[in-house]
Amino acid sequence: MEISKKPATIYDIAKLAGVNASTVSRALSTPGRINKSTAQKVQLAAEQLNYRVNPFARALPTGRTKMLALMVADITNPVFFRVVRGAESAAAEQGYTLVIAESQESSQLEAQTLRRVLPMVDGVVFASTRLSDDEIRVVKSEKPVTLINRELTGIGSIVARNESGIEELISHLHNLGHHRVGYVGGPQASWVNADRGRILKAKASNAGIELVDLGVHPPTQNGGRAAFEPVRAAKVSAVIAYNDLIAIGLMNSAVDAGIRVPQDLTVVGFDNIFGSDFTNPPLTTVESPLELIGGEAVRQLLVALEDSNDSTGPRPDTKTKLIIRGSTAEVCK
Amino acid sequence: MEISKKPATIYDIAKLAGVNASTVSRALSTPGRINKSTAQKVQLAAEQLNYRVNPFARALPTGRTKMLALMVADITNPVFFRVVRGAESAAAEQGYTLVIAESQESSQLEAQTLRRVLPMVDGVVFASTRLSDDEIRVVKSEKPVTLINRELTGIGSIVARNESGIEELISHLHNLGHHRVGYVGGPQASWVNADRGRILKAKASNAGIELVDLGVHPPTQNGGRAAFEPVRAAKVSAVIAYNDLIAIGLMNSAVDAGIRVPQDLTVVGFDNIFGSDFTNPPLTTVESPLELIGGEAVRQLLVALEDSNDSTGPRPDTKTKLIIRGSTAEVCK
DNA sequence: CTGAAAGCGCTTACAG
DNA sequence: CTGAAAGCGCTTACAG
């Protein structure tokens, strides 16, 4: 329980090992280029002194901080947990530290946070951003950037492949006998919402299902509650929500209105968020490989940074898949 | 869309403003100690050059990085979301950046992560840690530390005041006519578990309720499922779980076994995690002011760091409170 | 393979 | 109030 004394520097090591500080530096960071026994001597001394490199001192001459920023709109949104987990472990694997920054759904706060964080990181992955295409390009002009679930020419991105899950979903609904189903859309500006809507429309039409557009809504439980009236008015036997949160809000309002799920109304969501399995009934949903996506986003960023690395390994398949639970049933008429 | 050119330094500003670099430094960080018009000239030049201080260059001479680490056991555990949110915004408020580090419930991984992160932060708050008392003291010997929901002499900490919520809970159960209730404990080593258990026992005994100890369990849904057998064997009319996750697992198993909640068995949890309101039935739970606690933890850390500040404002009350939902009912016999 | 030196961008006593 | 200088702990050409 010593009182915090100054940590050892390479000069302390140099003295102890009887070599020059530059040799210490090399022995520690590029041991290949140095006499084996010298390197060992240095490493031993470093250990004795409980040496740890000062990351800032290293960052100054190299310009590299070994930190990455992960930008999310809302830390408390369960959709991001798995993204964060995947990103964090991919970063740690390569000795990088992740700074998680939150925009709180405000583009102004996001810009401000970015201004604080950008100078201290080597690159940023946007898991969700309120920034415009142009603003993203400005960031990209300063540091490498990768985008999650948004595409923008000239910028690396990784997105969930919604086709596979939606294919399964439409076929599931078709088998259940649904012919007229509603889509409760998410935010207008959301790339993901557009993607899901487009694919949904195509697959539904292929299957001879009429897809009714039920408007755009906030991606929250309240958004789902507010969407209930349009849903009821549309006289659909099934409804697909932009995400699980909306689906859950929708189910609540339906129950309050005396509509039974799934007997009277089939409901499905997207994401398979934490808790979607203990709704009543448990929610049928299309799941994205969020953890994989988070990990892949930082891996992509890292090859841009360490350009030595395997330039581009095979991109993993980010396919989505349907998880069938209790909120979908045959149309009974 | 310029190709990333080198960011401006204080020397660029110095040249543009026609002063010495040290004057620039002072004008930017301690504007009070400098001629007003000089300061303005400098600030103008800084703006023109779109200057942002290099945090690492600043960190070297000062030893301060303006970064804080927040250590959690599991990023995907919903209990931490609000802690993170509170900590993050308290940090941002003072211009600090939060690094969230995850131990993944492994003390080895935690130690390793700490080794990577500790050199780059000014202090650390442990939201949950697998470290032993002694290990925490070692960290504390290097950097200021504050603890959430754990007490350790000599180390600043902030804990939820479980009395208030438990008081309400016991009185609620008492009013409902329960006389024999079980406690499904959490991890043996958890400070919070011990605290809740102790208070529960005291309050129950005051109210003439017999509290049956149902053992220690992992704080997860599976833990809750596994706890169902002991619960049933104990022949209690109500059960209190260490946390919501356990309570939810317990409810699942009960339903599977044909036991109705709350008619046949009253269930209550702790934490009020995301999703606990849409279980079936919605879970009655004791809520902690997690966001406040997270914020207060970093604020405490910050006064230790900036010792100039208001040495110690009044500590906010971290009282817990009962949220009554559908999983509790009168004992019907 | 190794040393001596310069430099990364800032801060901060020390003079004046 | 301001300048000139030293120093924070590392890395990396440049010699040898």
Image (spheres, coloured by chain):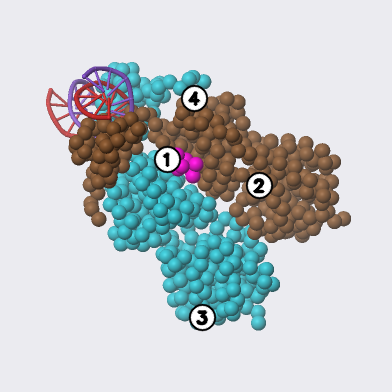
Chain colours: A cyan, B brown, C purple, D red
Is any part of residue A316 visible from this angle?
A: no
Q: Can you tell which of label 4 and label 3 is closer to the viewer? A: 4
Q: Report the residue marked by disc 4.
A: B141
- Identify residue type, mark 3: Glu
Q: CA distance from mark 4 to mark 3?
A: 67 Å
Q: Residue at x 75, y 46 (%)?
A: B169
Q: CA distance from mark 3 to mark 2?
A: 45 Å
Of labels 4 and 1, earlier in sequence is 1
Q: Is residue A194 left or right of residue A36?
A: right
Part of the protein shown in magenta: B88-96
- Identify residue type, mark 2: Glu
Q: Residue at x 44, y 55 (%)?
A: A106
Identify the chain of the residue marked 2, using the numbered disc in the image: B
The numbered mark at residue A210 is 3
Determine crowd level at label 1: few under 14, some 14-19, many 20+ residues with C-alpha closer than 10 A: few
Element marked by disc 3: strand
The numbered mark at residue B219 is none
Q: Report the residue marked by disc 2.
A: B287
